[in-house]
Amino acid sequence: MVEERNRLQPFLVRVSKRIAELDRSTRTDLEEMDHKRRNEIFSEIDSLKQLYHRTLRTPTWPFDRDIFLRFLTPQVFSLLSLVGIAEPIVTAIRSLIVSIASSGP
């Protein structure tokens, strides 16, 4: 997992440097650059940003966190109900898990 993250890091750095270069070129060559070329550069920047975010979301765990949470959540709540923990605690835990799941990648 850590190895995968370390393997992806140099690629992400190269993509971000390329985005910065392209962005800089649109500001420095303003007078010489025509509309068509500027739109091509903006399109490439958008494409690279999508690639960056997609690569950044690549799972580095041996399991998919979202699937794991979907499976684990009902099991935990069933167990808590059997143990007899009060409903406010179950509600608080449920809202915590939902907020964690919604803040994912």
Image (cartoon, rainbow, N blue to C red):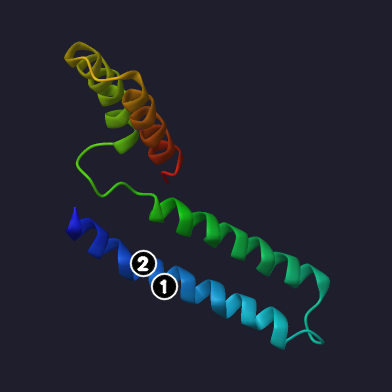
Q: Horizontally, is 69 left or right of 34 in the view?
A: left
Tag 2's secondary structure?
helix
Please give the name of the residue rendered at 23% of the width and 37% of the height, measured from the top-left corner: 63
Q: How many marks?
A: 2
Task: Kindly report the distance in space between the C-alpha atoms of the residues bearing marks 1 and 2.
Answer: 5 Å
Q: Position of residue 87 (x, y in %)?
A: 34, 19
Q: Position of residue 40 (x, y in %)?
A: 69, 65
The amino acid pointed to by label 2 is Phe
Q: Pointers 1 and 2 in contact (CB under 8 A)?
A: yes
Q: Horizontally, is 80 left or right of 103 in the view?
A: left
Please give the name of the residue rendered at 22% of the width and 56% of the height, measured from the top-left corner: 4
With respect to residue 15, does 97 lie above or below? Answer: above
The residue nearer to you, when weighing 63 against 47, is: 63
Q: Residue 49 has which mark?
A: none
Tag 1's secondary structure?
helix
Q: Residues within 10 Å of mark 2 (few under 14, many from 20)?
A: few
Query: Where on the picture, by quarter, is residue 91?
Result: top left
With respect to residue 62, does 89 lie above or below? Answer: above
Q: For mark 1, what is the residue?
A: 14
Q: Position of residue 32 (x, y in %)?
A: 79, 86
Q: Position of residue 96 (x, y in %)?
A: 38, 36
The residue nearer to you, when weighing 24 against 61, is: 61
The amino acid pointed to by label 1 is Arg
With respect to residue 89, does 82 lie above or below? Answer: above
Please give the name of the residue rendered at 32% of the width and 66% of the height, measured from the top-left corner: 9
Q: Specify the farthest residue to the top.
A: 82
Q: For mark 2, what is the residue?
A: 11
Q: Horizontally, is 7 left or right of 34 in the view?
A: left
Q: Residues within 10 Å of mark 1 (few under 14, many from 20)?
A: few
With respect to residue 5, does 79 lie above or below? Answer: above
